[in-house]
Image: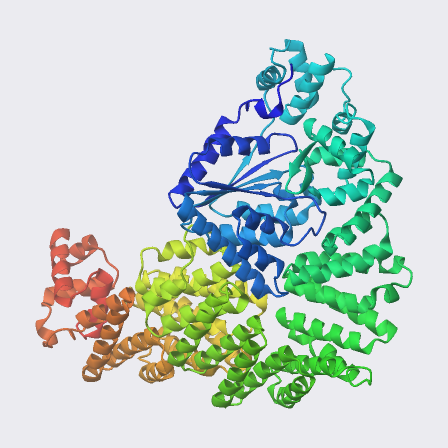
């Protein structure tokens, strides 16, 4: 007698179950985690997960079943399933009513993550079981990334099954799996086939008797240990007593399970196979087309046979492999007609356009498939699923020429479809593909003389080229768009779009004089056309030009108007972009203190709208962390930049982690090196990560007394940036200042040990950095406009460090640097006071140096900048400015000066003893006395102090 499948015990898998239980247990302690249970179809992934669920004694399990709807799938389908499992009607409403913008999608993701966290706090660990990850739609996959990247202390465990066969044909899922695999809390378990003895055990459980050895061996040979196949063969064996009658191909085996059913039941099951996921009862009955009573009996038989299971208000196959085998067994003509009936039934039932489009595609009905795919693209965008929209639009573009009178059928042109595809690609984070589609749209619109489409295509091309910083390609399409917009049949909104993008292209190309009249005209036209989105865009451009033109007050007024307009019309992302631009206006204009309240207001708005992880939300968090650091509030800067330590940074988190290193290095935190080491593999994520992480590592190594290594890191960072964004990035000025500072320290150390060659090498390396800094001042690129207060200050420091590198006192240079950082950069102000004091001490001006050192020490102590504070204190000790002055002749004895002079020559204690005819121990005692008198902590520092105080000659 064959046991029902639900009663067959799990065979093996103890090691895998132990890991799954450990992950859930860790989640119960506030350490979230995830496990990908991977393997080919039938290897027992779902069975293992079900065993885990059955053994849980606390917490809550929510189950999500992904379904194969082809690419791109139904937007947010898995996420909707999760919301339904949680019983959260508000989230279900949010998902159903999602607006077509990134902002709404991020807010929904955040709400879902918050709901899961709340469930974990209330009910113990929440186990989110995701079945068949390989079929997860793109939008739900984005949420999974969001959840696993940002979870820190939530009581959440995610267990996802993943079918590995066929992944080669699913590049999107392969990328997803690869990304998830790089996250620290994600583990992967690949289920191996059963061993021969385990197959024998499973056969015994299914059939109720121990199988003969040769039978078990044959089953193992034919199944390669796949549990699903083993169980299917065992059932066939129990019913027929034969193994040779079982088909060798899996599809034949699975389809053969239909044979015990009557003709009506077989027809119903075959009809159900046309639906990639659960099929509603009402839709199935329409497609089957038989009397309800017959369908009722057929469904009962299919459920009892284990072919179908009741799910919600419909039915699903017990395993999709079974559904696929039955579907593939249909004759071609039968399949085409089946999908045509599905398309009609689903359309009549008001199903999603994506579902209807899929069936028309499979039915070979290209005209209807084209029309429904266009509707599906609109539906996907309204559900903030640009990936899905892009794939629907790509299908339309690919099949357009095969549909008679496609223009009339669709009510649009192929060129305008290409424009929509370019927009979707941009929203999906594929700017390079968007550029290609926009260029295609240009060609298509030009070919048919569609002026409006041609303008829209060029405008989108310009937008994406700006995103890619390919400014040298902007002007031609931007100017062509304006020229085409002059045609009589181009509406006012499209004409305004052309002007707006021309203004942006001129601004991005730093042709600010030419951009001004165009931006003003664009603003006028956007207002006349009553297109708020374009008006906000134009206002932002005009404000930027006002800032460059030296009128920050008017720029602030323009941006304030843009914020209000965006808020009035519900343009949330545009509102935050205007907020960010306003904060940037203050910060880059030298008003660091003024930027902070703007950022506080904007970040509060981002929190309340759920947009904290949108692009402007991230940019504002980054700028807030920087502004706090520059303002001297190092601990607050660290808090603003905080990301979960156990997470491998994605683009946003990597940038925040990088800016957090400013304060970590300045504070001299013990974990600064670890923070920077974790970012070492993230330099390619974003140029700003490479710039900031490279610069902070340079600074850390300089403070650690490794100037040569520090300069090397700065050089590596600059080379990386040159390769990625070219050699004109203004950030190179900061790297130049840091590298020159490190080389100046290296040269000073070389001079103390009379290493002329080493000092010359440092000076030669510094000359190259100085030349690069001057080139950047002359022709660098960053924000449009001149260097601004920050850039001018870093240039001033490069000049001062270069003079220090050459061994010059550099009093005037450090005075200029101190004045330049007077806009409010507290850490650099303290540094410049320290260096200026040292420069004046070299010239013997102790009177003016003392208050500078005192002010620098007080500032460093207030900020908690330990490395700087230690350096300032060392200067005070070695120059005796921390105590009453004493005559230099009474500081050291004659013998002590002799010993110190030989130390300066680089001699060891033993060599000094031989030279002075004293013991090595006596030389050591003299040196210890010298260091105590001078307040020095090392031989090198003692030589430096004595030289600066005129006690020895070098």
**In this rendering, position of residue 870 left or right of residue 727:** left
Q: Quadrant of residue 699?
A: bottom left
In the image, 844: left or right of 797? left
> Residue at position x 31%, y 56% from top?
670
Image quadrant where one finds the N terminus: top right
User: Which percent across, then down, holds residue 139?
Assistant: 62, 54
Up-down relation of residue 784 to residue 18 (above or below): below
Please give the name of the residue rendered at 32% of the width and 69% of the height, measured from the top-left corner.
748
* Quarter of the figure with the C terminus: bottom left
Across and down, in percent, residue 16 comes to 50, 31
**Res 763 seen here:** no
- Left or right: residue 355 versus residue 620 is right
* Residue occupying the point 76% across, 77% down: 455
Of residues 289 and 643, the one drawn nearer to the viewer in this rendering: 289
| Outermost residue to the front | 293
Q: Is residue 945 visible?
A: yes
Q: Nearer the viewer, residue 908 or 301?
A: 301
| Count of residue discs | 0
Up-down relation of residue 232 to residue 65 (above or below): above
- Nearer-the-camera pick, 800 or 611: 611
């Amino acid at each position: 007698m064959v046991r029902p499948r639900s009663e067959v015990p799990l065979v093996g898998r103890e090691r895998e179950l132990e890991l799954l239980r450990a992950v859930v247990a860790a989640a119960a302690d506030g350490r979230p985690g995830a496990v990908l249970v991977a393997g080919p179809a039938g290897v027992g992934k779902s069975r293992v997960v079900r065993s885990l669920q059955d053994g849980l004694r606390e917490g809550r399990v929510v189950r999500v079943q992904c379904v194969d709807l082809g690419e791109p799938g139904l937007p947010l389908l898995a996420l909707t399933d999760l919301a339904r499992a949680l019983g959260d009607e508000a989230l279900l409403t949010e998902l159903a009513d999602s607006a077509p913008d990134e902002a709404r999608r991020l807010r929904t993701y955040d709400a879902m993550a918050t709901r899961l966290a709340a469930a974990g706090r209330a009910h113990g660990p929440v186990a989110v079981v995701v079945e068949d990850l390989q079929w997860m739609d793109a939008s739900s996959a984005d949420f999974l990334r969001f959840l696993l990247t940002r979870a820190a202390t939530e009581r959440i465990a995610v267990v996802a099954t993943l079918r590995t066969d066929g992944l080669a044909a699913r590049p999107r899922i392969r990328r997803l799996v690869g990304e998830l695999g790089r996250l620290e809390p994600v583990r992967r378990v690949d289920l191996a086939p059963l061993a021969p003895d385990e197959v024998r055990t499973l056969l015994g459980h299914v059939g109720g008797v121990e199988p003969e050895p040769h039978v078990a061996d044959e089953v193992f040979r034919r199944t390669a240990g796949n549990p699903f196949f083993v169980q299917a063969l065992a059932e066939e064996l129990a019913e027929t007593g034969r193994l040779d009658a079982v088909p060798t191909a899996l599809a034949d085996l699975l389809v053969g399970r239909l044979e015990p059913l009557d003709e009506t039941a077989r027809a119903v099951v075959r009809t159900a196979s046309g639906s990639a996921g659960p099929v509603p009862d009402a839709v199935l009955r329409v497609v089957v087309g038989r009397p309800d009573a017959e369908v009722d009996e057929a469904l009962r038989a299919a459920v009892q046979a284990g072919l179908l299971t009741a799910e919600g208000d419909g039915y699903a196959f017990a395993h999709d492999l079974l559904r696929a085998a039955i579907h593939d067994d249909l004759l071609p003509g039968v399949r085409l007609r089946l999908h045509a009936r599905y398309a009609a039934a689903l359309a009549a039932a008001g199903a999603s356009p994506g579902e209807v489009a899929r069936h028309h595609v499979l039915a070979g009905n290209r005209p209807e498939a084209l029309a429904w795919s266009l509707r599906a693209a609109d539906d996907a965008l309204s559900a903030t699923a640009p990936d899905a929209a892009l794939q629907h639009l790509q299908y339309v573009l690919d099949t357009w020429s095969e549909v008679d009178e496609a223009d009339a059928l669709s009510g649009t042109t192929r060129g305008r479809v290409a424009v929509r595809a370019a927009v979707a690609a941009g929203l999906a984070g594929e700017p390079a593909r968007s550029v290609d589609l926009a260029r295609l749209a240009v060609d298509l619109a030009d070919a048919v003389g569609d002026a409006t489409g041609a303008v829209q295509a060029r405008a989108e091309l310009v937008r994406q080229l700006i995103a890619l910083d390919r400014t040298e390609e902007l002007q031609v399409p931007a100017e062509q768009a304006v020229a085409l917009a002059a045609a009589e049949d181009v509406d006012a909104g499209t004409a305004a779009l052309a002007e707006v993008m021309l203004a942006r292209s001129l601004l991005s190309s730093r042709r600010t004089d030419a951009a001004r009249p165009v931006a003003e005209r664009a603003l006028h036209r956007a207002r006349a056309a009553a297109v708020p989105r374009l008006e906000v865009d134009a206002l932002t451009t005009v404000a930027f030009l006002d800032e460059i033109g030296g009128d920050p007050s008017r720029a602030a007024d323009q941006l304030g108007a843009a914020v209000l307009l965006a808020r009035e019309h519900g343009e949330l992302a545009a509102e935050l972009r205007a907020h960010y631009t306003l904060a940037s206006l203050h910060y880059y204009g030298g008003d660091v203190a003024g930027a902070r309240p703007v950022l506080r207001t904007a970040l509060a708005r981002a929190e309340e709208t759920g947009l904290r992880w949108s692009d402007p939300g991230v940019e504002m968090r980054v700028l807030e962390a920087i502004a706090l650091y520059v303002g001297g509030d190092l601990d607050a800067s660290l808090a603003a930049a905080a990301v979960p330590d156990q997470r491998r940074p994605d683009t946003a988190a990597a940038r925040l982690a990088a800016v957090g290193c400013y304060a970590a290095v300045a504070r001299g935190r013990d974990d600064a090196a670890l923070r920077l080491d974790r970012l070492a593999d993230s330099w390619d994520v974003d140029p700003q990560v490479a710039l900031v992480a490279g610069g902070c590592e340079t600074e850390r190594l300089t403070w650690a007394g490794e100037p040569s290594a520090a300069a090397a890191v700065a050089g590596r960072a600059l080379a990386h940036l040159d390769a990625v964004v070219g050699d004109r990035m203004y950030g190179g000025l900061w790297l130049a200042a840091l590298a020159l500072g490190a080389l100046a320290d290296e040269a000073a150390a070389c001079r103390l040990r009379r290493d002329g060659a080493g000092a010359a090498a440092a000076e030669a390396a510094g000359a190259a950095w100085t030349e690069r800094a001057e080139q950047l001042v002359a022709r660098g690129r960053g924000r449009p406009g001149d260097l601004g207060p920050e850039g001018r200050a870093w240039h001033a420091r490069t000049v001062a460090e270069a003079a220090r590198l050459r061994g010059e006192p550099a009093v005037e240079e450090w005075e200029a640097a101190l004045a330049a950082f007077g806009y409010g950069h507290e850490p650099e102000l303290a540094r410049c006071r320290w260096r200026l004091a040292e420069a004046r001490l070299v010239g013997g001006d102790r009177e003016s140096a003392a208050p500078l050192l005192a002010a620098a020490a007080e500032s460093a102590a207030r900020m908690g900048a330990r490395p700087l504070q230690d350096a300032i204190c060392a200067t005070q000790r070695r120059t005796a400015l921390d105590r009453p002055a004493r005559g230099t002749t009474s500081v050291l004895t004659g013998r002590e000066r002799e010993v110190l002079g030989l130390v300066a020559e680089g001699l060891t204690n033993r060599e000094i003893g031989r030279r002075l005819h004293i013991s090595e121990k006596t030389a050591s005692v003299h040196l210890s006395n010298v260091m105590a008198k001078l307040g020095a902590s090392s031989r090198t520092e003692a030589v430096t102090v004595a030289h600066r105080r005129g006690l020895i000659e070098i």
